[in-house]
Amino acid sequence: MPVITISREYGSGGREIAQRLCEILGYTYFDKDLMAQVATEMDLSQADVVDLSEDTYKMRTFTERLFGRRRVRAEVPETPGTEGGLRVETLSESESIRLVRETILAAYERNNVVIVGRGGQAILREKPGVLHVRLIAPLGGRALNVKEREGLTLGEATERVRVKDAGAVAYLERFFHIDWNNPLLYHLIINTGKWESARVPEIVIAALMNLKTVTEF
């Protein structure tokens, strides 16, 4: 069955919806564990721990832009594919993104996977058999969700949502040269603030079942 990519505004319920889709469809959720498994099969020594995503990316400071590319610190197993000790390595952003891209492409070949964030809508844009979903919701509702989930004040939650969204915009512009909010990147855009949470996976599945084999942009 087709692969699903989900791009979501922070606090719109993307992770929960993705997990529910996996439960219903028997799909695999693309996370660090799956990255590790795919990386082992691909003989990539660092991809199992390098996960530079929108959630972890921060916009570069003026100093970083002035003096060069930022480095990414990552925990790497002493023996790849095992649960032994960890060592800390420093990778460039470009190296990290390359590994993320390669593992997403490998996961696509497996089918039956839900990929949340990480530029999936850009990496798999030209691939057939992929449903690209965008989840949005009003800022106030998303801030309330984050407030309850993360134990913050409403002001803190609102600021976190703004920062996370800004980081996602910068991440996708910097590494994939796309506008996060471009509707033409997606087959389906859902305002989760207008639907019961249990209904959103049903909408996605209905779209999935009617997806054309060949995708045109």
Image: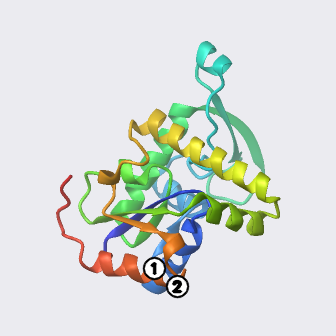
Report which residue position mark 1 lands on.
Answer: 201
The reply to whether residue 96 is visible in this rendering is yes
Report which residue position mark 2 lands on.
Answer: 198
The quadrant holding residue 214 is bottom left
Q: Quadrant of the N terminus?
A: bottom left
- The residue located at (28%, 80%) in the rendering is 209
Q: Nearer the viewer, residue 100 or 209?
A: 209
In the rendering, at what x and y percent does residue 166 appear?
Answer: 58, 42
- The residue located at (62%, 50%) in the rendering is 55
Q: Nearer the viewer, residue 102 or 30?
A: 30
Left or right of 164 on screen, residue 7? left
Q: Given the image, on which type of amino acid does mark 1 rest?
A: Pro
Q: Nearer the viewer, residue 34 or 85?
A: 34
Color theme of the render: rainbow
- The residue located at (46%, 78%) in the rendering is 200
Query: For the residue carrying disc 2, how many other residues have a C-alpha within 10 Å: few (<14), some (14-19), or many (20+)?
Result: few
